[in-house]
Amino acid sequence: MSTSKRFLVISRHPPYGSSHARDALDTALTTAVFEQPVSMLFLDDGVYQLLQAQQPAAIQQKNLGATLSALPMYDIDQLYACDKALQNRGLQPEDCLLPVQRLDSNGIAELIRTHDVVMSF
Amino acid sequence: MTLHTLNRPPSNTALLTDCLNACSSGDCLLLIEDGVYCALAQQPLELPEGVTACVLAADVAARGLQSRLHDSIRQVDDAGFVKLCCEHPRVISWY
């Protein structure tokens, strides 16, 4: 018997400076491995994770962008980002390594309401 | 002369304000780790008179920001970081 809940992972921190971004991604991937539907929402400085051309070899870290690009292969294709956060940081859709749906604050509130479990990083 | 290193993004407004208020003419502000987001052309830093800013190149490259830096900000490598520490009698970490 499968009882699926809808999971939402919220990621609010930029990549590499702390483990928050990596933890959010690992949680989303783990949730997907258990065949639960999972969405990701990027808020605040978390939208910097979406930038292309990340080259973290010189700081001895794994490329988070490469893992993000692989999300659709794990059936994580419900990706959302705060429109205001992208705008404030001058990020255009072509700057992003994945297509994300841009949400205003009403959209974000509704997204949260339509998920059963929300985890925030 | 003092070297200031800052490793938090500009969304941490209180830290950035404290750091900039503590800078004097002739000081150098080195942006490292998530501090490199303070160097973007999109949100230019309001540096006090006579203060120069630079960024650690490896942290810029890691975050894919090479083409987004403000023109006035110089990139330094790890050896340049060490050199700055040697050149300045005081080093303050803002974190």
Image (cartoon, coloured by chain):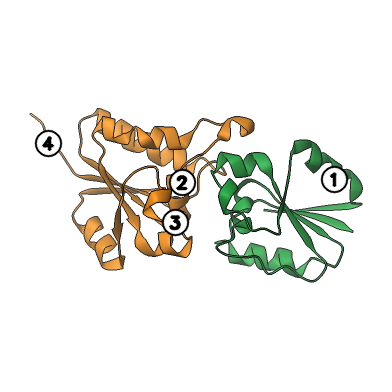
Marks 3 and 4 on same chain: yes
Marks 4 and 1 on same chain: no
Inter-mark Cα distance, 1 to 3: 34 Å
A110 lies above or below A42: below
Inter-mark Cα distance, 4 to 2: 35 Å
- Nearer to us of marks 2 and 1 is 2
Point out the tag, 4 or 2, that comes first from the N-terminus: 4
> Measured from the top left, where is residue B69 in percent x and y?
61, 54
Chain letter for mark 3, please: A
**Which residue is identified by label 3?**
A91
Inter-mark Cα distance, 2 to 1: 31 Å
Chain letter for mark 1, please: B
**Which residue is identified by label 2?**
A51
Point out the tag, 3 or 4, that comes first from the N-terminus: 4
Q: Which mark is residue B75?
A: none
The residue nearer to you, when weighing B36 against A118, is: B36
Inter-mark Cα distance, 4 to 1: 58 Å
**Which residue is identified by label 1?**
B85
Point out the tag, 3 or 2, that comes first from the N-terminus: 2
